Image: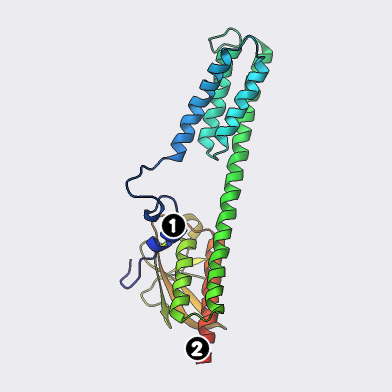
Amino acid sequence: MSAGLHDTSRAVHRRFHWPGTPGSRRQGLPVIDRGAVTVACGLVAPLAVAGVLASFRAAIPATDAALCLVLVVVAVAAGGDRLGGYLAAVSAAAWFDFFFTRPYGTFDITSRGDVETTVLLLAIGVAVTEIAVWGRRQHLASSKRAGYLEGMRAAAQAVATGASAATLTDQVCSSLTAVLSLRACVFQPGMAGIGAPARLEQDGRVTMTRQSWDADRDGLPFSIDTELLAEADGLLVGRFLMSPLPGAHPTLEQRLVAIALADQAGAALANERRAR
C-alpha cells in the first residue's frame, strides 16, 4: 500500500458486517464452515432418513420412500452449495437402492422399475441442486445491487445536505471500498497520473502504463495502486487513489458503479468550488 493511503477496509467491514471479517463476529467464537456442513449433511442425511424409513418398508411403497428422499435432497440443496447437493443426490439414490430395491441390503437392482426410480431420484436431485445454486446466485446479485444503490444514495445524501468536501470524499471512499473490495482509498484533489498508477477508465476498463489490463480475468492490479478520476464537465477535480484487497475481482457492473460514484463526487466538488 502506498504511503499516505488510509486503510479503509476494517471500517467498511465493520459497517457492512461482511462474513469472515474482523467486525463480523465476536472474538473467540468458532467459525463454522457452511460448505463443510452442507457436504456432511449431503452425505449423512439421506442415509439417516433412508434408515428410518427402512424400518417401515413393509408399509411404505418404494415410490413414497423415494419422494421422502427427494425432500431431503431439496433441503440440502436449498443452501446453494453445488457439491453438497450433488452428494445428497448420489447418497439418496445409493441408499434408496440399498434399502428399498430387491435384493435388500445390497446395491444390486433386479427390477427395471426400481432402476428407473433410482435414476429418476438421482436426476431430480441434480436438477434441484442446479436450480438452488442459480437461485442463490440471483439472490446474491440482488443483494449486491442493493448495496451499490445504498452507496450511491448515501453519497447523494451527503451532496444534498451540503456536507463538506472531506465528508463527501470520505463517504465516496467508503462506498468504493465496499464496491471494489479495497484495502485503502484516499481522495487527492487536483492530481492525476502521479506515481504511474493503473487507471480505472470511464468505460470500466483498467489500463496500466497505457496498456489494457484484463480486470475481468485478473482483477485490479495488486502490485500498484489504481486511480479513479473525479471530473466535472471534462475538467479534472481530483482522483481517488485505491489499493485493492488481495484477489479483488470487481465485475464490470461494480466498476461502472464506482465510476458513477466518482462522477457524482466530482460534480459536487466542482459546484462547491464555483460557489466559493
Mark sitting on residue 273:
2
Mark 2 vs mark 1: in front: 2
The answer to which of 220 and 54 lies nearer the viewer is: 54
Colour scheme shown: rainbow
| Horizontal side of residue 149 vs 220, given as left or right | right
The residue at the point 57 percent across, 47 percent down is 137
Q: Residue at x 69, y 14 (%)?
A: 113
Cβ–Cβ below 8 Å for labels 2 and 1? no
Percent coordinates x, y for residue 76 in the rendering: 55, 33
Q: Quadrant of residue 65?
A: top right
Residue 186 pos. (x, y %): 40, 72
Q: Which residue is mark 1?
A: 248
Q: Is residue 239 above or below residue 274?
A: above
Q: Is residue 236 above or below residue 155?
A: below
- Taking the spot 57% from the left edge, 28% from the top edge, the residue there is 89
Percent from the top left, x then y, of residue 58? 63, 9
Residue farthest toward the right in the current orientation of the protein: 113
Instruction: Please determine whether, in this image, residue 79 is positioned above or below residue 172.
Output: above
Q: Give amino acid for label 1.
A: Ala
Say if 89 sits above or below 114 in the image: below
Of residues 9 and 29, the one drawn nearer to the viewer in this rendering: 29
Please identify the residue farthest to the left as the structure is shown. 3
Image quadrant holding the N terminus, namely: bottom left
Secondary element at image label 2? helix
Inspect this view and state whether residue 116 appears.
Answer: no
Amino acid on which the number 2 mark rests in the picture: Arg
Q: Which mark is residue 18?
A: none
C-alpha distance separating marks 2 and 1: 34 Å
